[in-house]
Image (spheres, rainbow, N blue to C red):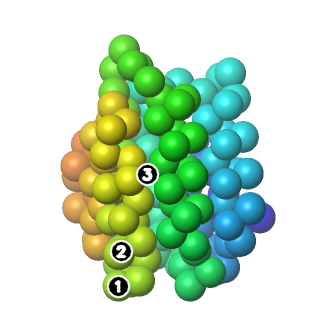
Amino acid sequence: MPITLNTRPEHNLIIFTHTGEISDDDFLEFYQRHFKDETFNPSTKLLVDLREADSRPRNPDTLRRFAAFVMEHMNNPSTPPKVAVVAPKSLTYGLARMYQSYADPVPWDFIVFRAIDAALAWLDVPEDTIDDSGEKA
């Protein structure tokens, strides 16, 4: 699957790595399944790594639908999660910022970064948490 999930419980972190083209349906299905999972802890820090993503197929309406879904499933967590998105490519960065505006009412700290080291520092996670390929170190 073009989206992989790596959990790093020692850092209270989940890393979502996007690789290549991901259809809107696959994108929504993956994240809806994750957020609906009863084991999902809303106070977990999330890192969305889009460094290897090809965002050309992403439809802005899909981002709106995803934002509505997240608002429905993330209402009033006891500890709002921190979400860092790493999007160095211009198109991917722009779409991530668009999503950020759609999801503004969600009770979380959500920031889009261009560099992985800045995202990890903001999440207070050591830089060696992921290697250059985006996999667990």
Residue farthest toward the top in the current orientation of the protein: 78
Tag 2 residue: 93
> Circle 2 — which element?
helix
Q: Earlier in the sequence, mark 3 or mark 2?
A: 3
- Cα–Cα span, label 2 and label 1: 5 Å
Label 2 neighbour load within 10 Å: few <14, some 14-19, many 20+: many
Label 1 neighbour load within 10 Å: few <14, some 14-19, many 20+: few
Which residue lies at the image location 41% right of the left edge and 83% below the top edge? 91
Q: Which mark is residue 90?
A: 1
Q: Would you say the residues marked 2 and 1 are in contact, meaning their CB atoms lie under 8 Å apart?
A: yes
- Cα–Cα span, label 3 and label 2: 14 Å
Q: State left or right for residue 29 relative to residue 127.
A: right
Q: State left or right for residue 100 relative to residue 72.
A: left
Q: Amino acid at mark 2?
A: Tyr
**4 above or below 122?**
below
Label 3 neighbour load within 10 Å: few <14, some 14-19, many 20+: many
Count every numbered label the image shows and give the total: 3
Query: Residue 15: x and y, percent?
Result: 51, 51
Tag 3 residue: 47
Query: In which quarter of the view is residue 34 placed?
Result: top right
- Cα–Cα span, label 3 and label 1: 19 Å
Which residue lies at the image location 43% right of the left edge and 51% below the top edge? 47
Q: Amino acid at mark 1?
A: Ser
**109 above or below 29?**
above
Query: Residue 19: x and y, percent?
Result: 62, 74
**104 above or below 28?**
above
Which residue lies at the image location 51% right of the left edge and 69% below the top edge? 60
Q: Amino acid at mark 3?
A: Leu
Query: Residue 103: x and y, percent?
Result: 38, 47
- The one nearer the camera, 113 or 56, is 56
Q: State left or right for residue 45 relative to residue 112.
A: right
Query: Residue 59: x and y, percent?
Result: 57, 73
